[in-house]
Image: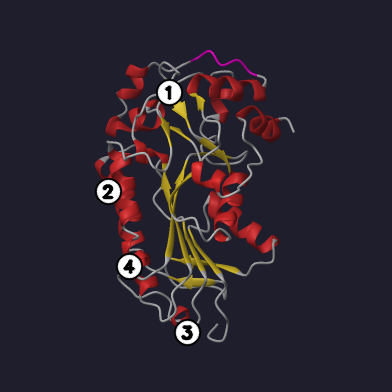
Amino acid sequence: MDNQATPSVLVTGARGLVGGALLRELARQGTTSGALVRGQAKSEQDFSWDAAGRSPIDARLHASPPKVVIHLAGEPIFGLWTPGKKRLIRESRIVGTENLSRDLSQLPQKPELLITASGVGAYGDRGDEVLTEESSFGSGFLADLARDWEAATQPALDAGIRVVKLRIGIVLAKNGGALAPMLPLFRAGLGGKSGSGRQWMSWITLDDLVAAILHLMRAPGVEGPVNATSPEPVSNRAFTAELAGALRRPAIFGVPAWALRMVPGGMGQEILLASQRAVPAKLLASGFEFRHSRLEDALQAMFRG
């Protein structure tokens, strides 16, 4: 492995839904790519990296650095928000991003671009307000997380690396992502809205998210926060109706808001009841074209195409 040139694109979180899809698309397009992995590298396409900063980044990167690093690693958001879970969510993102940014800033030749994941939770619960990248941070666990997560890229910025902070919406995929826990209920005819159903949901298909990342690699004028969401967010009521329709099932078994607010740690409130009406102003201004702008079209393609 010592003589193997570093791929031009390296990805953390390569075994996740988005990372895996991204690597497959890069390979399909003929772009050399590899994974930054925790622990020992097991192949020529793997490069070791310690998110906790206890050991240095793979020495091969000092001799042959990548041009682009895409940072998607982090403890899954879904799950019971115990104090320990919340700590893991924060540390895996903030500490990991800060250490990676510092490692990249110390390479003899810096990468041209660092793309990091963030989330539309950055905006907090904002009702019907239309949210662009110019909108302020909100309040709450996810908003505070995003603020500190994005700030952890500062070492890379100080080193002159272009940094894009993807504020990703609800990722829709036929197998995995946000739909995975919903589908069994909806297929059984037991799905329905959360609370009043009036809260806005900002979503994006997996295919469009991967395409957006590739687009940003070729858009040198875009930096900072970027909303990775469809141009047409929908209400929770509309989302559940469209999902049920695509599956040819009813959606009449809603969950009352009071029950969701009783979920420990605030997960029900922040993930299921909070309203984020985010729009991808920067992506659209940079010329990105969505394959699926409308939820109905996206779900029909997934389940009835």
Q: Nearer the viewer, mark 3 or mark 4?
A: 4
The numbered disc on residue 87 is 2
Q: At numbered mark 3, what does the secondary structure look like: helix, strand or loop?
A: helix
Give the labeled residue for mark 1: 199
Could you tell me which secondary element the residue under label 2 belongs to? helix
Residue 63 bears which disc, if any? 3
**From the viewer's perspective, is residue 89 above or below residue 64?**
above
**Quadrant position of the N terminus in the picture:** bottom right
Q: Earlier in the sequence, mark 2 or mark 1?
A: 2
Return the residue nearer the eye: 8 or 277.
Answer: 277
Residue drawn where x is 47% and y is 30% of the image: 201
Q: Quadrant of residue 32?
A: bottom right
Q: Find the distance from the CA under tag 3 to the CA under tag 4.
A: 21 Å
Where are the magenta residues, as a range? 249-253
Residue 1 is marked as: none
Mark 2, other Cα within 10 Å: few <14 / some 14–19 / many ≥20: few
Q: Name the residue that disc number 4 marks.
A: 158
Q: Mark 3 or mark 4: which comes first in sequence?
A: 3
Q: Position of residue 15 (x, y in %)?
A: 53, 56
Q: Main secondary structure of the magenta part?
A: loop
Q: Amino acid at mark 3?
A: Ala
Furthest residue toward right = 305
